[in-house]
Amino acid sequence: MSPQILYEAQGALATLTLNRPQARNALSDEMIEGLIEGLDRAEAAAEVRCVLLKANGPAFCAGGDLKQMRDQEGMFAGDSAALRGRYVRGLQRLPRRFALFDKPVLAVIEGPAIGAGLDLACMCDIRFATPSATFGSTFVRVGLVPGDGGAYLLARAIGFPHALELMLTGRVIEVEEAARLGLVHKVDEDAAAAARVHAGLIINNAPLAVQLTKRGAYRSWDTELETALELAATFQGIAQRTEDHAEAVSALLERRDPDFSGR
C-alpha cells in the first residue's frame, strides 16, 4: 500500500490512517489509490466487520493541495476537458467506492476537515470529533465547486438547507455547531477511543445483518416508499435464513450471548 495511507487490522476492526501530515493530509492521487486499496483489503477480509478512518498530524484533511492547484500539477493539470476526466477517473472514485462499501466506516476527526476533507468525512457513516475539529465546505472561497460530489454528500449528512448555506458562504464551523447540525455524532477529547467503543457495539451484531442494514438505509433514503419496502423484504428474506439469525434467536431464548459466524 501507499505510505500515504496506513492499514492496520486488529481482530474485527480495521483502521485506515491518512499519513501525509506535512501537507495537512491534503488529498493526492497516491492517497486516493491508497484509500481505495485499503477499502478493498478490508472488504476482502472476512474477519473485518468495521473500519475506522483517521489521520496523522494536526489536520484530518485539508482537502485539495493548494500548491498543486497553483502550479496546475498532478490531479489539477490540463485544460477543462482534461480536468473533467481527471475528476471522473480520479477523485470521484472515492465517493463511488465508499458508496459500494457495505461494512460500516467510522471517521475520527481531529483538527480541520476542509473542502474535500469534509466530503471525505461525509463519505463515512458515523463521525467522531475532538473539540479542536473544524469543518468547512470552502470551495467557493478558492473559486471552485465541490468536484467530488460534496453537494450530495453534505446534504445527505445534514439536510439540504444547512448544506446549501455552508457551501454558498464557505464558512468554517466549530465542532459545537457541527454537532448541532448532526454532522458529528459525538465530541470527545479522545475521539478515537470513543469511535472504537462504538465500533465494538457494531461488531457485536450479526455481520451480514449490519451490512444489509447499511445498504438498505442508503438505498432507501432518497427513493419512494414502495421501492424501499421491496428492498426491505428482499434483504429480510436473506437475513432471516442465515445461521446468524438462528443463532441470535437461540441465544436470546437461552439467555446467553450469541456467537456470530457471519453466515
Image (cartoon, grey):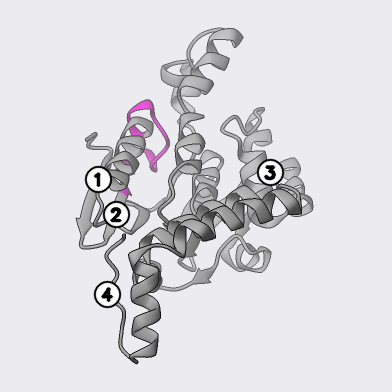
Mark 3 or mark 1: which comes first in sequence? 1
Mark 2 → mark 1, Cα distance in angstroms: 8 Å
- Asked if one can make out residue 96 in the rendered structure from this viewpoint, the answer is yes
Q: Amino acid at mark 1?
A: Leu
Give the residue number, with chain letter if any, for mark 4.
259
Give the residue number, with chain letter if any, for mark 3.
170
Mark 2 vs mark 1: give the one in front. Answer: 2
- Which portion, as a residue range, is magenta? 17-31
Q: Amino acid at mark 2?
A: Thr
Q: Residue at x 74, y 44 (%)?
A: 169
Q: Nearer the viewer, residue 211 or 28?
A: 211
Marks 3 & 1, CB-CB < 8 Å contact: no
Give the residue number, with chain letter if any, for mark 1.
6
Rendering coords of residue 22 (x, y %):
32, 40
Mark 3 vs mark 1: give the one in front. Answer: 1
Q: Is residue 234 above or below residue 143?
A: below
Rendering coords of residue 66 (x, y %):
49, 29
Location of the C terminus by quadrant is bottom left
Rendering coords of residue 229 (x, y %):
67, 56
Mark 2 or mark 1: which comes first in sequence? 1
